[in-house]
Amino acid sequence: MLFNEKMYELGSKRSVIRDLFEYGKEQSKIVGAENVFDFSIGNPTVEAPEIVNKTIVELTYKKSSMELHGYTSAQGDEETRQAIAMYLNKKYDTNFKSDNFYMTVGAAASLTICFNALTSSKEDEFIAIAPFFPEYKVFVEGAGAKLEVVSADEVNFQINFDELEKKINKNTKGIIINSPNNPSGAVYTKETIQKLSDLLMKKSNEFDTEIFIISDEPYREIVYDGVEVPYVTKYYKNTIVCYSYSKSLSLPGERIGYILVPDEVVESKKIYAAICGAGRSLGFVCAPSMFQKVLVKCVGKTGDIEIYKKNRDLLYQGLMELGYKCYKPQGAFYLFVKILGDDEEEFCKRAKELNLLVVGATGFGCPGWVRISYCVDEYMINRSFGAFKKLKESFE
Amino acid sequence: MLFNEKMYELGSKRSVIRDLFEYGKEQSKIVGAENVFDFSIGNPTVEAPEIVNKTIVELTYKKSSMELHGYTSAQGDEETRQAIAMYLNKKYDTNFKSDNFYMTVGAAASLTICFNALTSSKEDEFIAIAPFFPEYKVFVEGAGAKLEVVSADEVNFQINFDELEKKINKNTKGIIINSPNNPSGAVYTKETIQKLSDLLMKKSNEFDTEIFIISDEPYREIVYDGVEVPYVTKYYKNTIVCYSYSKSLSLPGERIGYILVPDEVVESKKIYAAICGAGRSLGFVCAPSMFQKVLVKCVGKTGDIEIYKKNRDLLYQGLMELGYKCYKPQGAFYLFVKILGDDEEEFCKRAKELNLLVVGATGFGCPGWVRISYCVDEYMINRSFGAFKKLKESFE
């Protein structure tokens, strides 16, 4: 075969989200941008905190090319990793050291590196909890393992533990969790995390295996109403954290994040080494050097989360008043809405005819819902209610 | 197994080069930095051209967060790809369009994405021409293919065609070439590229297969004395170019480069799609967005190459005068020197005792030589000659 067919398929099928986004741009030319309500994409709209740009300019003037743009070690700059460790230790009363961190080229890289480091057999399984980010499947299969899915708890969007317990077996390598969650906006409670920890301890003992939690948490700081996001490593020893600054610092295009392997993880030094090896094998030489240095000054900062909160409140209240059933998001910047009727495709099609671009949640493993991304302009939300009203009426 | 053993091995064995570099730092504390001559690493020492930093500052002031730091499309920013196409078309009289380019997170990413896109069976083979960058083996094997090596032409450091012809078989997927070459500093002549093209056409016909050239060329602009680096796509249709701005713009830590798939490549649209898919599967979401935008203004610029040339001349002449046998590099920033005696390890050990840190070339597939990286301070070169003299005397 001339090329890898699986890669060809992955590269030639555009995602539903990307398709909608492109449709929106085309449709804007026809009906006018003010009449298209594109809720498809999760591209942060809040400005990066001022200190990000200030630090970029300062570093550019002060540092030599080699200092600013030279290779860092593969693990990442010592000073950066130190700053992250100190921030987390202070905030979560943990005890991390710089050597627990491996800097990455963003969340996707954190995940692919983890899956490649941990997968040792094609029987290995990772379990995602619906609703989940669809690329997990691509990343897990790319590493040569299998993805199993636990269906959604459609009431509280916590974890369907009965089903999870049944799905865990001797081949289970890890459970992928994502809280605050894309697409539901749910935050896992302490009770959920504790229960997950207890279950995994029980199952590890039962099968005499080690089961990892892969905690994918780019939305950790994007939460509302003072909701607490439990720090997972404090509840379960075999937790590996995958983080990205894409959302908190509004830097999605810059590709900067990290993997955290706490000392408590079984064989943590070896797992860390396997992560370094996977990073090397996949072609990640180091995380972007300038943004590593920017982080030293910006760890723990965020853009203005109030803007997202305002959007959330506006959209949630507006749609509830119109009679939609919505899950009230505690974090991230997505509103999860139950479809009207019983045909998700039909609902999305009618929405699209009204130039309301929302993403059907079958791709997230949770059919019968749609994801509405509210990292958009507040005025677009206000203008969109007329269309949402018509959509509702069309199902009455 | 708890983790992937191959990844663990890759991550726990430090490369010889990195080992020497760390040793140099330790030794500096003992004998003083001025007495350690570290020629181990290829980290550009020339400042990035002024327009790079100027553009960074300008963009930071002028663009919104979303424009500057937002996701770009997976292929890369249209404007950036357009700028690169126009530059190459003007310089090499080619006819590329923006859609022939896929922006990457540097040269290593360009290579891993290519190998993953092309490899469709574990029988697939890529051939490297010694001396070659040792990570090729890691990247090719990571993609599930095999790396075969053609031994070096130790006279002109062109291609040992007799051996190459014997190594090509029905499983040969591609030949990896790297000109200007790391570690020899050789530039392949027009005649070499033409002969390679002729051979691959002949062999493609013989086996009824398609054989690709993967042209890894981060040093394309780092050449001396007006030497011409032939543009490989003009000689052979199935050429895929892997490029990085690490060396030309002195931005190795920023991880920015591209893959070029010309229209002439067989099934070029499908190969391009497979490249998009491989990038997705490996976890590269997009190339760093700000540096993509910096490129629009900086394509075709370089740091001050004269500094490298001065170093090359100083080191080459100095070592020739001392009686070393050196290959005179026409490009890149490495000097390839024949060992004294017949034991590479012994030669490197004696050099190390004199605090001369040079890299034995067995790892590059070319035993009996050492690589001396001259992207260093000119004064260090001058101070090092005493030690090189003692090293020579120790073999007399």
Image (cartoon, coloured by chain):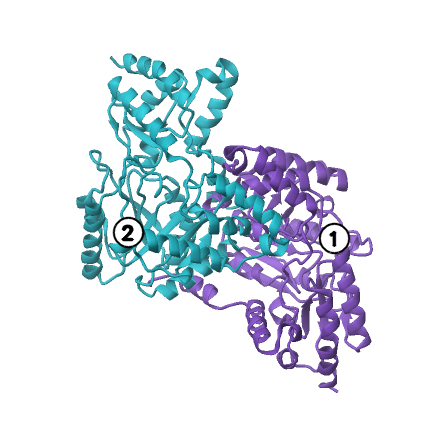
Chain colours: A cyan, B purple
Front residue of A392 and A320? A320
* Of B316 and B218, the residue lying toward us: B316
Q: Which residue is mark 2?
A: A232
Who is closer to the viewer here, A373 or B133?
A: A373
Q: Residue at x 31, y 57 (%)?
A: A94
Q: Which residue sits at x=68%, y=42%? A: B299
Horizontal relation, residue A293 to residue B47: left or right: left
Q: Chain of mark 2?
A: A
Is residue A28 shown left or right of residue B225?
Answer: left
Residue A279 seen in the current view: yes
Residue A101, percent from left and from top:
41, 57
Residue B304's label in the rendered image is 1
Residue A337 rendering spot, x and y as whole percentages: 28, 27
**Figure disc tally:** 2
Q: What's under tag 1, amino acid-wise?
A: Asp
Up-down relation of residue B274 to residue A65 (above or below): above
Q: Classify mark 2: residues with Cα within 10 Å, few (<14), some (14-19) or many (20+).
A: many
Q: Nearer the viewer, residue A355 or B113?
A: A355
Q: Amino acid at mark 2?
A: Val
Q: Quadrant of the N terminus of chain B?
A: bottom left
From the viewer's perspective, is residue B268 above or below residue B169?
Answer: above
Q: Examine the rendering and report whether any part of residue B209 can be seen.
A: no
Q: Share a chain, discs 1 and 2?
A: no
Q: Residue at x 82, y 75 (%)?
A: B321
